[in-house]
Image: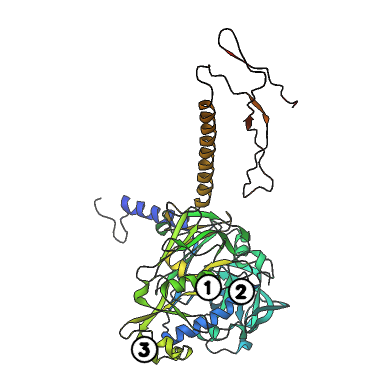
């Protein structure tokens, strides 16, 4: 028959191929869950207020560091200040908007006692899988604690569930201040290493231990004022081309070696540590480094550490970070959170934090940019590469490989091998200079010999010490360079015109 029987569907070879391809793709990526989320919009004043709250939280966060499938979670952009997605706790599932935070390792959600309007709260009495724990949970922030108690229940993230997971029910979040009241997230899901958690079992470690993931990785693709995504158990192959990896230097934060920070190719930092933190909206660095950048662009900083600058001064600015073998550049636009006219700025409450003499320097008719860059002086000098960086560069967090992958960096001079090549270059130049000196000495000594006499080999004595202090060695190098010991004693001329000298006595070795 040329046509299918009545009531049946004709399956063509092409349809079979498409079905096989779809199933293969699903097997490669695992079950992908897409949760649509609403994007909130903040005005200028609310943006600056949220920055104040983040500054307090960051000071505590980094001031005391001790204190078989794949899935995709949509990450919501909250006016480029807060990215949050959805996960659940309990049976039946109670859903929460959480910040997936690579700068911490605990999972906490609020219960009804937290007392903040608009927050979704956890009710353990409504969960059939709840088990009481009762241990005390507390994280101290600059303005107070985030505290509560531990409970045990089923935790689900991106479609993967782990039963019997220990997490925290928070009863007070006063330590987060205005940040928690304004931002739409309910809790925090820490995605860092066991070294930062009080339970020694971070949420992602629990997923790894459950052996449900195809790959023990997760990847962030943050949107710029639009929805982003978090992949659990893999990466988006279409957005991972050209990914390069950098090994971790610690298993606490997602921390790598920082080879340099520059503004328009001029170095501004000697810090050696960079931390990629999805829970931080900003870039932060040591005060000296950040102040150097502010001076370069003429930024004005208020008492809360928020920087404002005429947007026109950012057009030709490039802030770059050297990680591994690549350089990652951020333009002035990349580090700008929001902009308003000078007239609007002078009418805002932020103008009250500046002296009239400073306000008079803002020119009418121009725009003022709010920078996503602040000072943070941690015990170890470091740069925190938060969402400002991650919006520009997709990042894969490889738990199994203990490394991070970055997409979009620029290779070339100044990458991670810059210091190594400088050392090699200095060594080569030093060696050439030494050989040149030896050659000059030989040439000079040969010029001083009497004319008409045949040249003779220069007799060299035993080894002497040459001190060459290497920056990575505590003792000087011992070189066996011999030195010439010319002597005229016992010199004679043979009957055939040759120079005759006594055979020198060498010291015993």
Image quadrant where residue 93 sits: bottom right
Residue, disc 2: 61
Q: Nearer the viewer, residue 415 or 189?
A: 415
Q: Residue at x 66, y 79 (%)?
A: 140
Q: Nearer the viewer, residue 100 or 256?
A: 256
Q: Residue at x 51, y 49 (%)?
A: 422
> Is 353 on the left-hand or right-hand side of 483?
left
Horizontal and vertical percent for residue 217?
54, 59
Colouring of the image: rainbow
Whichever of labels 1 and 3 marks the residue nearer the N terminus, that label is 1
Q: Nearer the viewer, mark 2 or mark 3?
A: 3
Crowdedness near tag 2: few (<14), some (14–19) or many (≥20) residues, C-alpha within 10 Å: some
**Gap between marks 2 and 1, in whole Å?**
10 Å
Residue 98 visible in rendering: yes
Q: Is residue 440 above or below residue 257?
A: above
**Gap between marks 2 and 3, in whole Å?**
34 Å
Determine the residue located farthest toward the left in the rendered image: 2
Q: Which mark is residue 280?
A: 1
Q: Is residue 476 above or below residue 224?
A: above
Q: Secondary structure at mark 2?
A: helix
Q: Is residue 482 above or below residue 297?
A: above
Q: Nearer the viewer, residue 225 or 187?
A: 225
Q: Are marks 2 and 1 in contact (CB under 8 Å)?
A: yes
Residue, disc 3: 344
């Amino acid at each position: 028959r040329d046509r299918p029987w009545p009531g049946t569907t004709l399956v063509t070879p092409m349809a079979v191929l498409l079905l096989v391809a779809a199933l293969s793709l699903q097997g490669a990526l695992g079950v992908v869950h897409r949760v649509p989320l609403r994007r909130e919009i903040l005005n200028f004043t609310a943006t600056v207020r949220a920055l104040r709250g983040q500054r307090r939280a960051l000071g505590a966060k980094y001031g005391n560091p001790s204190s078989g499938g794949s899935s995709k979670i949509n990450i919501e952009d909250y006016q480029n200040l807060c990215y949050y997605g959805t996960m659940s706790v309990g049976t039946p599932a109670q859903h929460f908007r959480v910040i997936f935070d690579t700068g911490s390792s605990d999972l906490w959600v609020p219960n009804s006692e937290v007392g903040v309007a608009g927050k979704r709260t956890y009710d353990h009495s409504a969960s059939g899988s709840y088990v009481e724990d009762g241990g005390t949970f507390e994280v101290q922030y600059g303005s107070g604690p985030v505290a509560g108690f531990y409970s045990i229940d089923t935790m689900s993230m991106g479609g993967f569930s782990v039963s019997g997971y220990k997490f925290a029910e928070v009863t007070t979040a006063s330590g987060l201040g205005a940040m928690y009241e304004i931002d739409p997230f309910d809790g925090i899901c820490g995605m860092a290493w066991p070294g930062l958690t009080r339970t020694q079992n971070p949420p992602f470690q629990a997923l790894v231990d459950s052996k449900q993931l195809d790959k023990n990785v997760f990847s962030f693709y943050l949107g710029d004022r639009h929805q982003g995504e978090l992949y659990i158990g893999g990466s988006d192959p279409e957005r991972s081309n050209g990914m390069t990896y950098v090994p971790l230097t610690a298993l606490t934060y997602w921390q790598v070696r920082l080879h340099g920070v520059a503004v328009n190719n001029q170095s501004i930092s000697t810090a050696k540590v960079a931390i990629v933190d999805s829970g931080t909206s900003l870039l932060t660095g040591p005060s000296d480094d950040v102040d150097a950048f502010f001076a370069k662009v003429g930024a004005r900083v208020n008492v809360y550490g928020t920087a404002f600058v005429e947007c026109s001064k950012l057009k030709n600015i490039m802030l770059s970070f050297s990680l591994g073998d690549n350089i990652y550049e951020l333009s002035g636009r990349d580090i700008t959170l929001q902009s308003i006219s000078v007239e609007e700025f002078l009418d805002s409450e932020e103008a009250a934090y500046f002296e009239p003499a400073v306000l008079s320097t803002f020119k009418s008719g121009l725009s003022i940019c709010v920078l996503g860059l602040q000072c943070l002086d941690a015990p170890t000098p470091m740069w925190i590469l938060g969402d400002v960086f991650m919006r520009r560069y997709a990042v894969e967090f490889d738990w199994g490989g203990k490394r991070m992958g970055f997409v979009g960096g620029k290779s070339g001079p100044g990458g991670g091998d810059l210091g190594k090549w400088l050392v090699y270059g200095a060594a080569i130049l030093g060696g050439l200079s030494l050989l040149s000196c030896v050659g000059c000495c030989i040439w000079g000594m040969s010029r001083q010999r009497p004319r008409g006499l045949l040249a003779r080999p220069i007799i060299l004595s035993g080894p002497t010490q040459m001190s060459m202090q290497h920056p990575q060695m505590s003792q000087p190098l011992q070189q066996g360079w011999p030195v010439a010991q010319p002597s005229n004693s016992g010199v004679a001329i043979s009957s055939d015109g040759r120079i005759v000298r006594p055979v020198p006595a060498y010291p015993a070795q």
